[in-house]
Image (tube, rainbow, N blue to C red):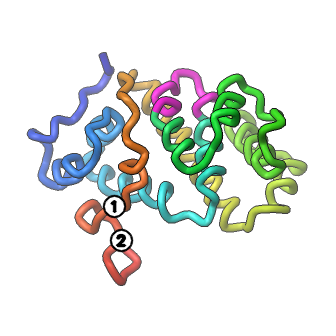
Amino acid sequence: MARLPYVDPERAPDHVREVLERMPPLNVFRMMANAETAFRPWMRWGGVLLNDLALDPVLRELAILRVARLTPHAEYEWVQHVPIARSVGATQEEIDAIERDDVDAGCFTDVQGAILRFTTEVVQDVRASDETFVAVSQTLSPREIFELLMVIGQYMMLARVMATTEMELDEPADPRQARRRPSPSDGGPRPGGRG
């Protein structure tokens, strides 16, 4: 049983209920909805990270899976993101290598290997080493590197929320739902505008 309550959409304030009713009924959303004023902006932020980055989606998902494997009690993150990783083109061989903590496996391209080392160092050491930073910067633009840091930070935070609140595992959501663009009523961008 989770240490904090899941928000019941029927009892939630209107602005929270409206968002919850549009999303898959996952524990992560119902838990994060406890932060009533931050919930809608957080959902929009998550949508940006899953939909609007220059960073390649496969690299994004490999980094998220690496964060999940490096963080004790982050099984929820792993379970939800394996299908998403597959849906954007990560191979089962790559997923299996991350699961067994083999980031130097031959199945990874040089770029993927550099991303995984970068993610490992940011999670474990706070700062990527000069060598790893140079390896990543030879392939990724400054924008993509910064987006990668944002992804790592978001999923480190989520892993800690999941672990501390002892959220129960859900069945994985349909990856197409996970990549859904937030609507303006979710706090997402408005047509013709910047949000």
Residue 41's quadrant in the figure?
bottom left
Q: Is residue 124 above or below residue 184?
A: above
Residue under numbered circle 2: 189
In the image, which residues are magenta?
A: 68-79
Which quadrant does the C terminus fall into? bottom left
- The residue carrying pointer 2 sits among few (fewer than 14), some (14 to 19) or many (20 or more) residues within 10 Å by Cα, namely some
Residue 5's quadrant in the figure?
top left
- Label 1 near label 2: C-beta < 8 Å? yes
Residue under numbered circle 1: 182
Most foreground residue, 95 or 12? 95
Most foreground residue, 185 or 165? 185
Q: Position of residue 173 (x, y in %)?
A: 37, 38
- State the CA–CA distance, disc 2 to disc 1: 7 Å
Q: Position of residue 16 (x, y in %)?
A: 20, 50
Which residue is the extreme one toward the top?
Answer: 1
- Is 48 on the left-hand or right-hand side of 12? right
- The residue at 38%/42% (across/down) is 174
- Under circle 2, the secondary element is loop
Q: Amino acid at mark 2?
A: Pro
- Under circle 1, the secondary element is loop
Q: Position of residue 134 (x, y in %)?
A: 87, 56
Specify which label sits upstream in the sequence, 2 or 1. Answer: 1
